[in-house]
Image: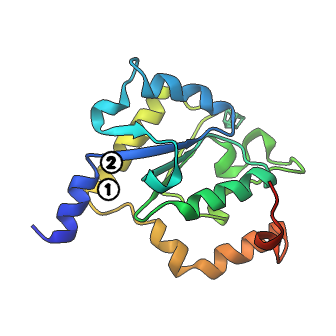
Amino acid sequence: MEWARLIDKVTSKSLWMMMYCTGCGAIEMPPTVTSRWDVERFGIMPMATPRQADIFLITGYLTKKTLKRVIYVYEQMPEPKYVIAHGSCPIDGGIYYDSYNTINRLDLFIPVDLYIQGCMPRAEAVMDALLKLREMVEKGEANAWQKYHENFEYYDKNQKALFGENWRAVMTL
Ligand code: SF4
Protein backbone atom coordinates (compact mmCIF):
# COMPACT_ATOMS: atom_id res chain seq x y z
CA MET A 1 0.00 0.00 0.00
CA GLU A 2 1.20 3.45 -0.92
CA TRP A 3 2.47 5.45 2.10
CA ALA A 4 -0.09 8.31 1.76
CA ARG A 5 -2.97 5.84 1.54
CA LEU A 6 -1.74 4.07 4.67
CA ILE A 7 -1.66 7.39 6.56
CA ASP A 8 -5.22 8.18 5.39
CA LYS A 9 -6.38 4.79 6.56
CA VAL A 10 -4.91 5.03 10.05
CA THR A 11 -5.93 8.69 10.42
CA SER A 12 -9.54 7.78 9.71
CA LYS A 13 -9.54 5.47 12.74
CA SER A 14 -8.62 8.22 15.20
CA LEU A 15 -10.16 11.64 14.60
CA TRP A 16 -10.31 14.26 17.32
CA MET A 17 -13.08 16.78 17.01
CA MET A 18 -13.30 20.38 18.09
CA MET A 19 -16.92 21.47 18.40
CA TYR A 20 -17.57 25.17 17.95
CA CYS A 21 -20.99 25.32 19.58
CA THR A 22 -22.14 28.67 18.30
CA GLY A 23 -25.75 27.87 17.31
CA CYS A 24 -28.79 25.99 18.61
CA GLY A 25 -27.49 22.73 17.08
CA ALA A 26 -25.02 22.46 19.95
CA ILE A 27 -27.76 20.69 21.89
CA GLU A 28 -27.40 17.66 19.58
CA MET A 29 -23.74 17.18 20.45
CA PRO A 30 -24.09 15.72 23.99
CA PRO A 31 -26.13 12.72 22.77
CA THR A 32 -23.69 12.28 19.88
CA VAL A 33 -20.60 12.05 22.06
CA THR A 34 -22.10 10.36 25.13
CA SER A 35 -23.67 6.95 25.65
CA ARG A 36 -26.78 7.44 23.46
CA TRP A 37 -24.82 7.45 20.19
CA ASP A 38 -21.29 7.09 21.52
CA VAL A 39 -19.31 8.33 18.54
CA GLU A 40 -16.09 7.37 20.32
CA ARG A 41 -16.69 3.74 19.33
CA PHE A 42 -15.67 4.89 15.84
CA GLY A 43 -12.49 6.55 17.07
CA ILE A 44 -13.95 10.07 17.05
CA MET A 45 -13.67 11.97 20.30
CA PRO A 46 -14.04 15.58 21.49
CA MET A 47 -10.94 17.73 21.71
CA ALA A 48 -10.78 21.05 23.54
CA THR A 49 -7.94 22.71 21.67
CA PRO A 50 -7.48 23.45 17.95
CA ARG A 51 -3.85 22.37 17.85
CA GLN A 52 -4.80 18.80 18.69
CA ALA A 53 -8.00 18.64 16.61
CA ASP A 54 -8.61 17.03 13.21
CA ILE A 55 -12.30 17.86 12.77
CA PHE A 56 -13.81 21.31 13.19
CA LEU A 57 -17.57 21.05 13.62
CA ILE A 58 -19.52 24.30 13.65
CA THR A 59 -23.01 23.91 15.00
CA GLY A 60 -25.02 26.71 13.48
CA TYR A 61 -25.34 30.41 12.82
CA LEU A 62 -22.29 32.63 12.82
CA THR A 63 -22.27 36.30 13.66
CA LYS A 64 -19.56 38.42 12.08
CA LYS A 65 -17.84 38.61 15.46
CA THR A 66 -17.95 34.82 15.95
CA LEU A 67 -16.75 34.15 12.43
CA LYS A 68 -13.46 35.93 13.15
CA ARG A 69 -12.80 33.46 15.98
CA VAL A 70 -13.79 30.56 13.74
CA ILE A 71 -11.22 31.64 11.14
CA TYR A 72 -8.51 31.98 13.79
CA VAL A 73 -9.35 28.57 15.25
CA TYR A 74 -9.33 27.01 11.79
CA GLU A 75 -5.93 28.48 11.00
CA GLN A 76 -4.48 27.11 14.25
CA MET A 77 -5.48 23.53 13.45
CA PRO A 78 -2.75 21.31 11.99
CA GLU A 79 -3.24 19.83 8.53
CA PRO A 80 -4.89 17.78 7.30
CA LYS A 81 -8.05 19.18 8.91
CA TYR A 82 -11.71 18.72 8.17
CA VAL A 83 -14.66 21.09 8.51
CA ILE A 84 -18.29 20.11 9.01
CA ALA A 85 -21.00 22.78 8.80
CA HIS A 86 -23.95 21.72 10.93
CA GLY A 87 -27.43 23.01 10.12
CA SER A 88 -28.97 25.34 7.56
CA CYS A 89 -27.45 28.51 9.01
CA PRO A 90 -23.84 27.97 7.88
CA ILE A 91 -25.08 26.62 4.52
CA ASP A 92 -27.37 29.46 3.39
CA GLY A 93 -28.16 31.59 6.44
CA GLY A 94 -31.17 29.51 7.51
CA ILE A 95 -33.81 31.50 9.35
CA TYR A 96 -31.26 34.27 9.86
CA TYR A 97 -30.65 34.68 6.11
CA ASP A 98 -31.55 38.40 6.20
CA SER A 99 -30.07 39.24 9.59
CA TYR A 100 -27.91 42.35 9.72
CA ASN A 101 -25.18 40.58 11.65
CA THR A 102 -24.91 36.90 10.63
CA ILE A 103 -23.22 35.41 7.61
CA ASN A 104 -25.06 33.25 5.10
CA ARG A 105 -22.33 30.96 3.81
CA LEU A 106 -19.43 29.63 5.82
CA ASP A 107 -17.68 28.31 2.72
CA LEU A 108 -17.01 31.84 1.52
CA PHE A 109 -14.54 32.21 4.40
CA ILE A 110 -13.06 28.75 5.06
CA PRO A 111 -13.32 25.50 3.06
CA VAL A 112 -16.00 23.03 4.18
CA ASP A 113 -15.82 19.26 3.67
CA LEU A 114 -19.34 18.27 4.66
CA TYR A 115 -22.69 19.94 5.28
CA ILE A 116 -25.43 18.58 7.52
CA GLN A 117 -28.67 20.11 6.39
CA GLY A 118 -31.68 20.72 8.62
CA CYS A 119 -32.82 23.04 11.34
CA MET A 120 -31.79 21.54 13.53
CA PRO A 121 -30.23 18.28 12.34
CA ARG A 122 -30.78 15.41 14.76
CA ALA A 123 -27.97 13.46 16.37
CA GLU A 124 -28.54 10.65 13.83
CA ALA A 125 -27.69 13.10 11.03
CA VAL A 126 -24.56 14.21 12.88
CA MET A 127 -23.51 10.57 13.29
CA ASP A 128 -24.16 9.96 9.61
CA ALA A 129 -21.97 12.93 8.65
CA LEU A 130 -19.14 11.88 10.97
CA LEU A 131 -19.13 8.36 9.53
CA LYS A 132 -19.22 9.77 6.01
CA LEU A 133 -16.25 12.01 6.83
CA ARG A 134 -14.39 9.03 8.27
CA GLU A 135 -14.96 7.19 5.01
CA MET A 136 -13.80 10.21 2.98
CA VAL A 137 -10.63 10.49 5.07
CA GLU A 138 -9.92 6.78 4.59
CA LYS A 139 -10.29 7.14 0.81
CA GLY A 140 -8.19 10.31 0.70
CA GLU A 141 -11.22 12.35 -0.43
CA ALA A 142 -11.44 14.87 2.43
CA ASN A 143 -9.20 17.45 0.85
CA ALA A 144 -11.05 20.74 1.31
CA TRP A 145 -8.24 22.05 3.56
CA GLN A 146 -5.96 22.21 0.51
CA LYS A 147 -8.26 24.83 -1.02
CA TYR A 148 -7.26 27.28 1.71
CA HIS A 149 -3.76 27.33 0.23
CA GLU A 150 -4.72 27.05 -3.40
CA ASN A 151 -7.45 29.72 -3.23
CA PHE A 152 -6.27 31.83 -0.31
CA GLU A 153 -6.77 35.05 -2.28
CA TYR A 154 -10.45 34.19 -2.64
CA TYR A 155 -10.95 33.52 1.09
CA ASP A 156 -8.85 36.51 2.06
CA LYS A 157 -10.86 38.78 -0.26
CA ASN A 158 -14.16 37.62 1.27
CA GLN A 159 -12.81 38.00 4.81
CA LYS A 160 -11.59 41.53 4.10
CA ALA A 161 -14.85 42.48 2.37
CA LEU A 162 -16.73 41.53 5.54
CA PHE A 163 -14.35 42.69 8.27
CA GLY A 164 -12.28 45.40 6.62
CA GLU A 165 -8.75 45.43 5.18
CA ASN A 166 -6.87 45.37 8.49
CA TRP A 167 -9.15 43.14 10.51
CA ARG A 168 -6.37 40.82 11.66
CA ALA A 169 -4.28 43.71 12.93
CA VAL A 170 -7.06 45.40 14.87
CA MET A 171 -8.93 42.36 16.17
CA THR A 172 -9.77 42.55 19.87
CA LEU A 173 -11.37 39.96 22.12
S1 SF4 B 1 -29.88 25.74 11.54
FE1 SF4 B 1 -31.64 26.05 12.92
S2 SF4 B 1 -31.02 24.94 14.77
FE2 SF4 B 1 -29.15 25.34 13.61
S3 SF4 B 1 -28.33 27.27 14.38
FE3 SF4 B 1 -29.63 27.72 12.61
S4 SF4 B 1 -31.63 28.22 13.51
FE4 SF4 B 1 -30.47 27.12 15.07
Establish whether ligand 1 lies closer than 8 Å to the Cβ of label 1.
no
Q: How is the image coloured?
A: rainbow
Within 10 angstroms of label 2, few (less than 14), some, or many (20 or more) residues? many
* Residue lying at 36% horizontally and 31% vertically, measured from the top left: 39
Within 10 angstroms of label 1, few (less than 14), some, or many (20 or more) residues? many
Q: Amino acid at mark 1?
A: Val
The quadrant of the rendered image in which ligand 1 is seen is top right
Query: What residue would you read off at disc 2?
Result: 134
Residue 76, numbered label: none
Q: Is residue 71 visible?
A: yes
* Residue lying at 69% horizontally and 55% vertically, measured from the top left: 69
Q: Secondary structure at mark 2?
A: helix
The front one of 22 and 130 is: 22
Q: Is residue 122 visible?
A: no
In three-dimensional space, the C-alpha distance between marks 2 and 1, rounded to whole angstroms, equals 5 Å
Q: Pick out the residue farthest to the top.
A: 36
* Residue lying at 77% horizontally and 54% vertically, measured from the top left: 103
Q: Amino acid at mark 2?
A: Arg
Which x, y percent locates residue 46?
Answer: 45, 38
Query: What residue would you read off at disc 1?
Result: 137
Q: Secondary structure at mark 1?
A: helix
Q: Is residue 17 above or below residue 65?
A: above
Q: Is residue 107 left or right of residue 41?
A: right
Which x, y percent locates residue 27?
Answer: 60, 26
Which x, y percent locates residue 127?
Answer: 41, 34
Q: Is residue 101 left or right of residue 94?
A: right
Q: Is residue 170 above or below residue 82?
A: below
> Do residues under tags 2 and 1 come within 8 Å of each other at their CB atoms?
yes
Q: Is residue 3 left or right of residue 50?
A: left
Q: Quadrant of the N terminus?
A: bottom left
